[in-house]
Image: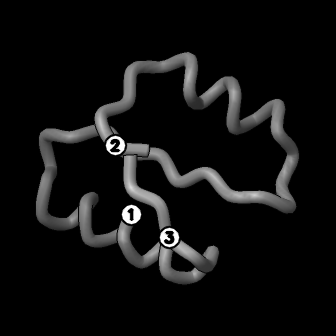
Amino acid sequence: MVLAPTRALARQVEKEFREFALSLDTICLYGGTPMGQQVRELNYRVDVV
């Protein structure tokens, strides 16, 4: 789990993981968006949150 102080930084970190760690499944969670979709994404196996 990676914690970031801003949504923009969280998305940037996720982008870097997707580019450089191709074998890892990632998900970026942040406030202000519907929780249901994020919970559904968490139900699938992810390596980095």
Query: Residue 2 vs residue 36: left or right?
Result: left
Q: Label 1 sits on what residue type?
A: Glu
Crowding at mark 1 (Cα within 10 Å: few <14, some 14-19, many 20+): some
> With respect to residue 14, does 45 lie above or below?
above
Q: How far across and down, in percent of the image, does residue 19 sit?
A: 20, 66
> Do the residues under discs 1 and 2 have CB atoms within 8 angstroms?
yes
Q: In the rendered image, which residue does mark 3 sit on?
A: 4
Which numbered tag is attached to residue 24?
Answer: none
Q: How far across and down, in percent of the image, does residue 25 sit?
A: 31, 38
Q: Pick whichever of labels 3 and 1 is earlier in the sequence.
A: 3
Q: Nearer the viewer, mark 3 or mark 2?
A: 3
Q: In the rendered image, which residue does mark 2 sit on?
A: 48
Residue at left offset 34%, top offset 43%:
48
| Numbered circles on residues, count | 3
Q: Secondary structure at mark 1?
A: helix
Q: Pick whichever of labels 1 and 2 is earlier in the sequence.
A: 1
Query: Residue 33 vs residue 40: left or right?
Result: right
Q: In the rendered image, which residue does mark 1 sit on?
A: 14
Q: How far across and down, in percent of the image, does residue 36 sit?
A: 82, 31
Q: Pick whichever of labels 3 and 2 is earlier in the sequence.
A: 3
Q: Quadrant of residue 2?
A: bottom left
Disc 3/disc 2 C-alpha distance (Å)? 13 Å
> With respect to residue 18, does 35 lie above or below?
above
> With respect to residue 46, does 7 lie above or below?
below
Q: Secondary structure at mark 3?
A: loop
Residue at left offset 12%, top offset 64%:
20
Residue at left offset 25%, top offset 61%:
17
